Image (cartoon, rainbow, N blue to C red):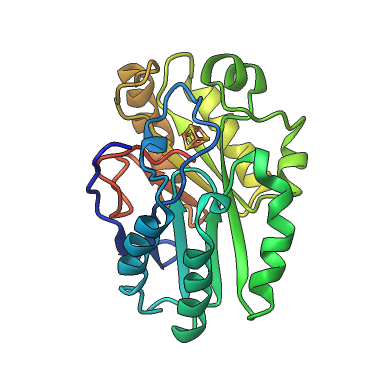
Amino acid sequence: MEDFNPNRYAVINEKNPREIVMLRGLGCSWRRCRFCDYHLDFSPDSSANFALNREQLEKVTGIHHKLEVINSGSFVDLDEETLALIETVCKDCHITQVHFECHWRHREAIPPFRKRFAAHGIELKVKTGVETFDALFRESYLDKGIDARSPEELAEYFDEICLLQGIPGQTAESMDRDIQTGLAYFERVCINIMQENKKPIKPDPRVIASFTKELYPKYIENSRVDILMENTAFGVGGVVEHAE
Ligand code: SF4
């Protein structure tokens, strides 16, 4: 584990108003994506993770009755004490909807997790970083680890998706196609514009310029689309890349 000290709590007052916490768990169990250093935000020490997570969860007020929980990897990588505290905080703060992240490989954990929260009247929205629906590009270049055959199959498990845009090989047309597919099959689309880190895949300034010129104006007012031109745009992060 590296020594990160990112901001881990924020309130989003614009589209889909919510509080957001960036918690820490055992870390992503995939760790192979060729663009991601977000998985470095982990600790094998569950007690230390819980202490850190409790400090952030104590800041939650329920101001918007919605909470987004992100962590390097998937909700399954969070310790049980943290999950139980999320439930308690939601009940105490009258939060009725919680967003979690999950990698495709943990998809079978989603239905029982939804049931667990539904027992308290809390609806879950589960997001996955598909990055692009072009499966050959995604798996041969990004090494994302998703073998879903179609957007329909992904939509059987997930409510929301993240797309990674601004990387070599993409065009305005291919990025637009991904956004349109995302909007057709999922409730919300979060577009992460690639930012440089130490991993092999780098941002392509020409692709980002074409996104900024052609796609940003087209989607910035869309209430179902979040656009993160920087990975700190939600007010959390700052040292690690949010990707999953
Ligand atoms: S993008 Fe997600 S699945 Fe891929 S290595 Fe990073 S945290 Fe893991």
Number of on-image labels: 0
Does 135 sit left or right of 176 as displayed? right
Residue 220 against residue 174 in the figure, above or below: below
- x then y, percent, for residue 155: 72, 46
- x then y, percent, for residue 237: 30, 47
In front of the other: 42 or 14: 42
The residue under the point 54% across, 15% down is 141
Residue 171 against residue 72 in the figure, above or below: above
- x then y, percent, for residue 92: 46, 85
Decide if residue 137 is in sight here: yes
Identify the image quadrant of residue 210. Answer: top left
The residue under the point 75% across, 33% down is 150
Does 112 sit left or right of 12 as displayed? right
Decide if residue 188 is in sight here: no
In front of the other: 229 or 74: 74
The residue under the point 55% across, 77% down is 96
The residue under the point 46% across, 46% down is 26
Q: The N terminus is located in which quarter?
A: top left
- x then y, percent, for residue 187: 62, 54
In front of the other: 41 or 133: 41
Identify the image quadrant of residue 18. Answer: bottom left
